[in-house]
């Protein structure tokens, strides 16, 4: 049904907005736990946009070759994989610190970098799929429904920003959650749209 597909498409952008907004709040925690500095943190944030740009560029080709459903399912799985990598960072770092302390920070940086990169690939795949999908679903009023669709991104950024301010870092408004739980909160929205 058009309504369900519209809602699922809208939620992909909400999930992406939440993920981007919460990731920016993790710098202090990563510096304390992993000794990740500002330059490395900036590289991780940059990875969160690189895959998006690549997929926007090549997305049309992929949509033509594989279709909407397959690409959305791939993005769904990759999005959850990105969240799982966040939970793996601390145990992996502890293991690396015991076996080779000199490379522990570098290794956990790679985990966080690739988690952000995979996340951004998902966002690019979503954009490549949902824009033509909504245009096809609502040919009589494309502009109106594309505007509604793209309200998901700022909505996710607002929700993610409030969540980050309330639950991430030493100065959290309500209570400080472990950064893994806070940053992977986008996965809740991912699961809803997946269903």
Image (cartoon, grey):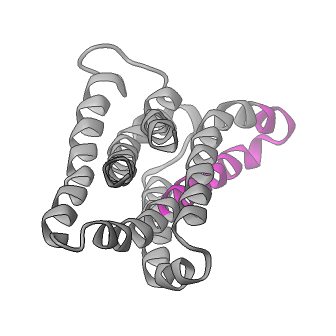
In the rendered structure, the answer to whether residue 19 lies left or right of residue 32 reads left
What kind of secondary structure does the magenta stretch mostly adopt?
helix
Q: Compared to 55, does 182 lie above or below?
A: above
Outermost residue toward the top in this view: 175
Q: Quick check: can you spot residue 171?
A: no
> Which of 98 and 114 lies nearest the eye of the viewer?
114
Q: Position of residue 125 (x, y in %)?
A: 49, 67
Magenta-colored span: 95-120
Q: Is residue 117 magenta?
A: yes
Q: Is residue 88 magenta?
A: no
> Which of 43 and 184 lies nearest the eye of the viewer?
184
Q: Residue at x 54, y 83 (%)?
A: 64
Indicate the quadrant where residue 135 lies.
bottom left
Q: Position of residue 82 (x, y in %)?
A: 59, 48
In the rendered structure, the answer to whether residue 127 lies left or right of residue 95 reads left
Q: Residue at x 74, y 37 (%)?
A: 92
Q: Compared to 126, does 60 lie above or below?
A: below
């Amino acid at each position: 049904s058009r309504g369900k597909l519209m809602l699922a498409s809208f939620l992909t952008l909400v999930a992406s907005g939440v993920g981007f907004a919460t990731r920016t709040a993790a710098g202090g925690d990563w510096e304390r736990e992993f000794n990740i500095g500002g330059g490395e943190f900036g590289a991780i944030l940059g990875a969160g946009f690189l895959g998006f740009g690549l997929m926007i560029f090549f997305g049309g080709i992929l949509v033509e070759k594989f279709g909407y459903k397959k690409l959305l399912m791939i993005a769904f799985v990759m999005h959850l994989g990105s969240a799982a990598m966040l939970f793996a960072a601390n145990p992996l770092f502890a293991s690396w610190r015991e076996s080779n302390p000199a490379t522990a920070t570098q290794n956990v940086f790679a985990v966080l970098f690739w988690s952000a990169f995979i996340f951004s690939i998902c966002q690019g795949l979503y954009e490549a799929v949902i824009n033509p999908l909504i245009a096809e679903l609502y040919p009589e009023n494309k502009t109106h429904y594309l505007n509604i669709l793209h309200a998901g991104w700022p909505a996710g950024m607002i929700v993610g920003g409030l969540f980050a301010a309330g639950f991430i870092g030493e100065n959290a408004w309500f209570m400080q959650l472990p950064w893994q739980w806070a940053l992977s909160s986008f996965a809740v929205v991912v699961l809803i749209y997946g269903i």
